[in-house]
Amino acid sequence: MKTALITGASRGIGAAVARRLRADGCEVVLNYERSRTQAEALAAELGGTALQADVSDPVQVKRMVDTVLEKFCQLDILVCCAGVAWQGLTQDMRMEEYRRIMAVDLDGTFYCCQAVLPQMIRQKSGRIVTLSSMWGQVGGSCEAAYSAAKAGVIGLTKALSKEVAPSGIRVNCVCPGVIETDMVKPLGPQTLAELAEETPLGRLGTTEDVAGCVSFLCSPAGDFLTGQVIALNGGLVI
C-alpha cells in the first residue's frame, strides 16, 4: 500500500485529494496548520493520520516528514495543496502579506519537495504533484504576488522533474481554474456566476475535478508523465 502526504488537507482541494487517494487504496497523511478539528475529523473518517505543520517553516516540514517515515517506513506520494491567497491592488499590499503568500505558496512547496526527496530517491520511485493556478500561467489582475508565487511553483516543478527523473520520481503540476472552495467565496456570488459563464464548459470547477486529476497523475496511467503542467480550468485559459 502506498503512503501519501497531502499538505493543506483539512478542507477544500486538499481534503478532496485525501478522500480520492484513500479511495485509490493509499494510506493518507493529512497535513494542517490551524484547522485541527477538521483535519482530525477527516483523518478519522478515512482511517488516516493528521499531522500539524506550517509548511512555510522548513524545520516543521522536516519533522512532519520524519514522523511519516517513522510510522510508515515509506513515502510514495506528495501532493502540495497548502496555499493562501490575497486580492487587492499591488500598491496596497503590506510587506507581511506579500511575504506570507511567497512563504506558503512557493517556499512551502519547495520545503516539502526537498524533505521527501531523500526517501523517494532511496526508493527509486515517487510521485510529487504541485498545485499552481491558472494565474501562475497567465497572471491575474489584483493578484500579482499570488500569480508570482504560483508561476514559481511551475518553474520549480519543471526543473525538479528533470533533476529527479533518473531516480524514478515523477513531478507534475496541476493548475486549477476557478474552483468552488472557501478561497474564492470573497469574490461574491455575482462574480462567480460571471466566471462560470465565461468558462467554455459553462461551470466552475469542483474539488473533485482536481482530485481526479491528481489521482490520475499518481496512478500507473501517469507513469510516462513528468514535468507537465495540467491546465484544469474548463477552457477558461488556453
Image (cartoon, rainbow, N blue to C red):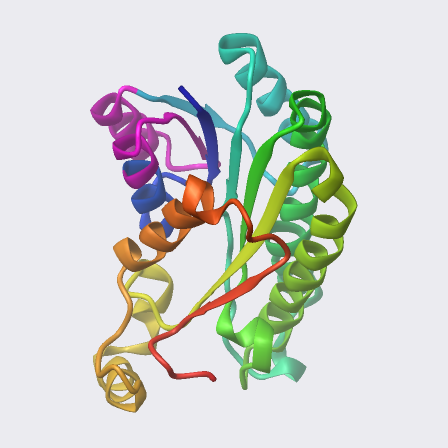
Q: Which residues are magenta?
A: 20-47
Q: Going by the image, does 68 lie left or right of 166?
A: left
26, 67: nearer the viewer: 26
Instruction: Tell me, yes or no, if residue 2 can be seen here.
Output: yes
Instruction: Tell me, yes or no, if residue 139 can be seen here.
Output: no
Residue at left 64%, top 71%? 145
Residue at left 29%, top 85%? 191
- Above or below: residue 97 compared with residue 76: below
Residue 226's spot in the image, x, y percent?
61, 52
Residue 11's spot in the image, x, y percent?
32, 45
Residue at left 39%, top 84%? 236
Say whether residue 25 is magenta: yes
202, 91: nearer the viewer: 202
- Above or below: residue 56 compared with residue 209: above
- Above or below: residue 140 compared with residue 38: below
Q: Going by the image, does 95 lie left or right of 204?
A: right
- Above or below: residue 226 compared with residue 188: above
Number of callouts? 0
Residue 149's spot in the image, x, y percent?
65, 64
* Quadrant in the picture for the N terminus: top left
Residue 144's spot in the image, x, y percent?
62, 77
Q: Going by the image, does 5 lie left or right of 98?
A: left
Residue 142 occupies quadrant: bottom right
Say whether residue 205 is magenta: no
20, 152: nearer the viewer: 20
Residue at left 37%, top 37%? 35
